[in-house]
Image: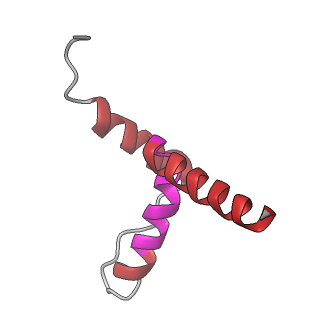
Amino acid sequence: MLRKLKHHFKHLWHIFRRLTGDDAYDVYLKHHAEFHQSTVDAPPVLTRKEFFKLWQESKWKGVKRCC
């Protein structure tokens, strides 16, 4: 029973991280490794700081007002 509870908690934690964007850098690294490492002109891997700066800029770039 404790294993099931632990499994469900891990699953909920994974969903929570996905919804809040907390795992965005991990998803980016996985995508980069799968699709860009084997190409000759692959873009360099962004640091965590660079990634989140670009991520937030793109997220909030179009917001012009609060409501």
Start-end of magenta stretch? 20-32
Residue 44 x/y as whole percent: 42, 68
10 left or right, relative to 15:
right
In the rendered image, the vertical position of residue 47 relative to residue 60, given as above or below: below
For residue 63, above or below residue 33? above
Position of residue 10 in the picture relative to residue 41 (left or right): right
Residue 62 percent across, percent down from the top left? 19, 28
Q: Residue at x 47, y 72 (%)?
A: 30
Q: Front-most of 20 and 1?
A: 1
The quadrant in which the C terminus is found is top left
Q: Position of residue 32 (x, y in %)?
A: 41, 72
- Number of numbered markers: 0
Q: Which of 10 and 48 lies nearest the eye of the viewer? A: 10
Magenta segment: does it hold 22? yes
* Residue plotted at (47% across, 51% down): 18
Q: Measured along the vertical axis of the image, is residue 52 above or below residue 6?
A: above
Residue 49, placed above or below residue 10: above
Q: Position of residue 56 (x, y in %)?
A: 38, 36
Q: Is residue 51 left or right of residue 47?
A: left
Residue at 57% from the left image edge and 52% from the top image edge: 12
For the N terminus, the quadrant is bottom right
Which of the colour schemes (rainbow, by chain, secondary structure, one colour) is used? secondary structure
Predominant SS along the magenta part: helix
Q: Residue furthest right?
A: 2
